Amino acid sequence: MPLNRRTFLESSVAVGAGAALTTGVAAPAQAHGRPPKPAKRYSFTVMGTTDLHGNVFNWDYFTDKEFDDKAHNDVGLAKISTLVNQVREEKGRRNTLLIDAGDTIQGTQLSYYYAKIDPITRTGGPVHPMAQAMNAIGYDAAALGNHEFNYGIPVLRKFEEQCDFPLLGANALDAKTLRPAFPPYSIHRLCTPHGRDVRVAILGLTNPGIAIWDKANVSGKMVFPGLEEQAAKWVPKLRSMGADVVVVSAHSGSSGTSSYGDQLPYVENAAGLVAEQVPGIDAILVGHAHTEIPEYRVRNKETGQDVVLSEPLKWGQRLTLFDFDLVWGKGRWTVEKVGARVLNSNTVAEDPEITGLLADEHKKVVAYVNQVIGTSTAAMATADAPWKDEPIIDLINHVQAETVKAALAGGEYAALPVLSQASCFSRTAAIPSGEVTIKDAAGLYPFENTLEARLLTGAQLKDYLEYSARYYVQTPAGAPVEPAKLTNAGGIPDYNYDAVYGLTYEIDIAQPAGSRIVNLSFDGRPIDPAARFVLAVNNYRASGGGAFPHVAGAPQLWADSDEIRNTIIQWVRAKGTVDPGQFASVDWKLTRNGAPVF
């Protein structure tokens, strides 16, 4: 892949007499009695978002109504735009920068529609709504997220072409040349009233897990080395090029953990390690982990200086502000102080400029998701699915198992039993009784995962289930059980807990992790450790996502190129009627010493 033409970017922003300026306290009088000139100072603000995931409007396309959650958060770039306008009004437009830390073009039906239904890649196609909104708001730079690669490199390249700002990825390298496939950095010149410009470098880093999670899209085309390694390469270069301030925009959490086990020699959530190990960084905008960190300070081991980290909450729920105070001395600007905070987007109204700009696109997608594709004989919901075997998860598994059986029919593995794995991706997804729409079916599967078939043994499946059952908090027999406190042990997200369809088993939550699966059976008999099974599994899991044992190394028998949610939509269309009585059963349950928890 050729080196992108925008490997180096520099923007110049002129600042007039209204620049942010503070006057420092005078130094002691000189010997001849004349007081020294006050120190030259300058202040500016870098604003940041991350994990926007296709959210422009404060709207939930899966429920077809305004977004809301228990904390009454709001979402979307239209809200962020209002906050950005307020900050620019307060600080001065020329004393601010606006950046993002990735995962921009995947996540809502709005972003899906313009990647798959009316794709931006078609000749004379539309401009991506996220590009339109971010251009209008005036972003200065954005790092690549792992979900940028979900729709393939051509869609990402077209999105990049449509953006008026650079997409940065210092550790997204061409697989053949090992040169950057995207601009590694951009440099922005802020002109102060003192005649001494401030040069702010933005270094973009993305997630090495792309090599696993989107293997089908990037294998042989791009490689993704570790964040620390590439930051150590680029930060000194940026300083030698005259950068007064270095800000890293990293699509990588701060915790130092990984969900892909030993699949790669790199850490998934490495932002904190970058701050600790690489000197010369002033601040890091953190992404990927979907957590809120207003301000987090990490001491750099070499310099002893604090690096300020901040992660604004996903989907445009928060806007990070890094406030920098600089002082001029010895012929250069030095960062005297930096702090971070977040603003809540639920405190402001949507910017009518942004909602008006994309009103037509929004209407098209609302009409699309409300198309009726079938009916259901019963209502189903995911509210209890994290701790109970619910029909709505059985629906996903049933569709996946049927799809794999049909694909393998007549072949070498047609006689093997087909099992399926699925997770509860959303605790608010539902299939209503009566008419079923695209939004209902798509809401079961908010990710762009595709389906594979892998070959596993009974013993490997036991290991797989034991690993999955780590999700539950160990709870002694007789102790009270609160469902809200029973799951997500060790911070394991819902999408990394799998229920396996086609087996029967119990999960004894009184036992320690690794010793919880009991009465594991197939077809009414204890499972044979040597027996072979086909597992219908999503590509994220099959590629090592979540670090589940055995599956990433298991033989691949078949793979689909279509998203699982499209497979579900097509299945409902074909059947016409969804009847839980034809596919739902209670195959697994939580127990304590043999007694059911629920």
Image: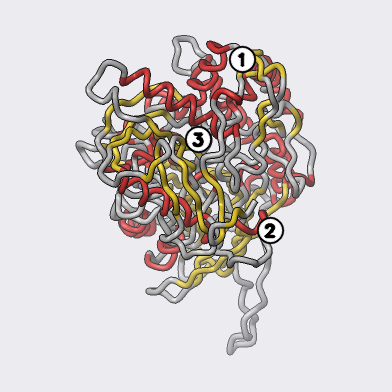
Residue 9: quadrant of the picture = top left
Q: In this view of the protein, which residue sits in the foreground, 587 or 465?
A: 587
Residue receiving disc 3: 165
Please state which of the two labelled residues, at mark 1 or mark 3, is closer to the viewer. Answer: 1
Please state which of the two labelled residues, at mark 3 or mark 2, is closer to the viewer. Answer: 2
Residue 482: quadrant of the picture = bottom right
Residue 39 screen position, x and y as percent: 60, 71
Answer yes or no: is residue 19 visible: yes
Residue receiving disc 2: 482
Residue 526 screen position, x and y as percent: 37, 45
What crowding class fits label 3: few (fewer than 14 Cα within 10 Å), some (14-19), or many (20 or more)? some
Name the residue at 75% across, 49% down. Answer: 71
> What secondary structure is marked by label 3?
loop
Q: What residue type is labelled 1?
A: Thr
Name the residue at 52% across, 44% down. Answer: 588
For residue 30, side relative to residue 3 (left or right): right
| In the depicted structure, whether residue 370 falls above or below residue 335 | above
Residue 132 screen position, x and y as percent: 59, 26
Q: In this view of the protein, which residue sits in the foreground, 316 or 236?
A: 316
